[in-house]
């Protein structure tokens, strides 16, 4: 493809990339994320309840490490991250919050271009798929509602996080079903229910695939899958494939810049890639020294 255009409105350091994970995945899924696409972003948070020298974890105390723990882990994590943001000047705070699991590959340059059309100072709840599930009132009664699928990523503007921040802990502890309930693990549904309850709407955009590239082609067909020239994310990615996808999109980006004879952008990217590569190597080396 020719004619590469980079994002005009936002830079990668405008986004908080939030990855929820668990201790059993620290040395597999989480490490693969850290060594690939996350190595080239400034602001990232791995949410889990267990600190470990092998991974820079934002610890969400008393949330657990099983699948059902994801809901509290995410609500507590969002509350922790945004609370810390309130202590710094407004001009330096995150403009967007991007939430995914540790088995999601993200193409950050493509994501930034998706966000060009949206003002982070307006409440936006962005995702890639919609379903129907059960929400709950404070009195325990339930009702059906649409929800934005977390398997394609959740993207929140700073204005939206500011609005939901005061409600996060009370909602997840007092309204959303607790562990062992069939709905307790549905973190994407819980977040959607809270956001819709507060009167905000969703924005669904293309490019957030809910599956691997191969299964995306199987589900939608080759023509439709390839019609999206700049996908933002893929889900259910195993560690080995995380590396393969990252390598593919790095080479693709370089090839596009060469085809365009965009030498300034190419020089910038190569220097950026080399710099971030050695930065993550130094971090991992120091961590291994601390472990030993």
Image (cartoon, rainbow, N blue to C red):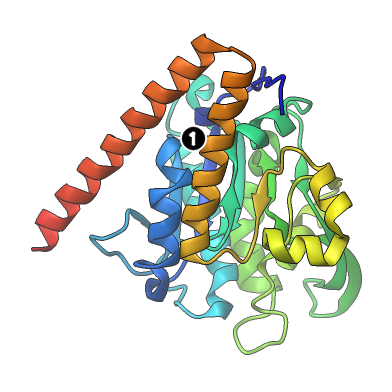
Residue 160 against residue 147 in the figure, above or below: above
Q: Residue furthest front?
A: 259
Position of 84 compared to 109: left or right?
left
Residue 113 placed where, x, y %? 70, 29
Tag 1 secondary structure:
loop
Q: Residue 219 at what x, y percent from top left?
A: 83, 66
Locate residue 26: give its quadrant. bottom left
**Taking 11 as reference, is 271 left or right?**
left
Q: Position of residue 63 (x, y in %)?
A: 47, 73
Residue shown at 86%/46% (left/top)?
A: 201
- Which residue is at 76% across, 38% downward? 229
Tell me what residue is drawn at x 35 percent, y 34 percent.
276
Answer above or below: position of 16 versus 137. Answer: above
Q: Which of the two residues, 172 or 156, is positioned nearer the viewer here?
A: 156
Where does the C terminus fall, quadrant-wise? bottom left
Q: Closer to the camera, 41 or 73?
A: 41
Point out the image quarter for the N terminus.
Answer: top right
Front one among 270 and 104 = 270
**Can the viewer see residue 232?**
yes
**Depth order, front residue of 132/60:** 132
Q: In the rendered view, would you say 39 is above or below 289? A: above
The residue depicted at 59 percent of the width and 35 percent of the height is: 252
Classed neighbour count for the residue bearing mark 1: other residues with Cα under 10 Å, few (<14), some (14–19), many (≥20): few
Residue pointed to by mark 1:
86
Q: Is residue 138 left or right of residue 46?
A: right
Please state the total of marks drawn on the protein image. Answer: 1
Farthest residue in the bottom direction? Answer: 180
Most extreme residue toward the top is 264
**Residue 67's image quarter?**
bottom right
């Amino acid at each position: 493809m020719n004619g590469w255009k980079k994002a005009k409105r936002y830079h990668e350091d405008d986004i908080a990339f939030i990855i929820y994970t668990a201790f059993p995945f620290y040395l597999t899924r989480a490490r693969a994320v850290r060594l690939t696409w996350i190595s080239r972003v400034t602001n990232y948070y791995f949410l889990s309840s267990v600190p470990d020298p092998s991974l820079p974890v934002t610890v969400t105390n008393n949330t657990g490490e099983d699948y059902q723990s994801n809901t509290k882990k995410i609500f507590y994590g969002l509350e922790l991250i945004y609370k810390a943001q309130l202590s710094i000047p407004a001009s330096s705070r995150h403009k967007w919050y991007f939430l995914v699991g540790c088995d999601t590959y993200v193409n950050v340059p493509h994501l930034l271009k998706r966000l060009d059309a949206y003002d982070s100072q307006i409440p936006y709840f962005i995702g890639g798929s919609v379903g129907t599930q059960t929400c709950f009132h404070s009195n325990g009664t339930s009702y059906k509602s649409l929800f934005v699928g977390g398997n394609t990523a959740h993207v929140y503007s700073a204005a939206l996080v500011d609005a939901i921040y005061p409600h996060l802990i009370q909602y997840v502890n007092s309204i959303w079903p607790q562990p062992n309930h069939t709905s307790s693990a549905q973190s994407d549904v819980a977040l959607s229910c809270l956001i819709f309850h507060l009167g905000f709407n969703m924005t669904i955009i293309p490019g957030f695939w809910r599956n691997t590239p191969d299964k995306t082609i199987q589900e939608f067909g080759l023509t439709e899958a390839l019609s999206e020239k700049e996908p933002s994310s893929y889900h259910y990615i195993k560690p080995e494939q995380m590396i393969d996808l990252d390598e593919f999109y790095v080479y693709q980006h370089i090839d596009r810049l060469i085809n365009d004879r965009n030498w300034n952008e190419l020089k910038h990217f190569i220097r950026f890639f080399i710099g971030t590569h050695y930065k993550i190597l130094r971090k991992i080396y120091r961590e291994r020294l601390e472990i030993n």
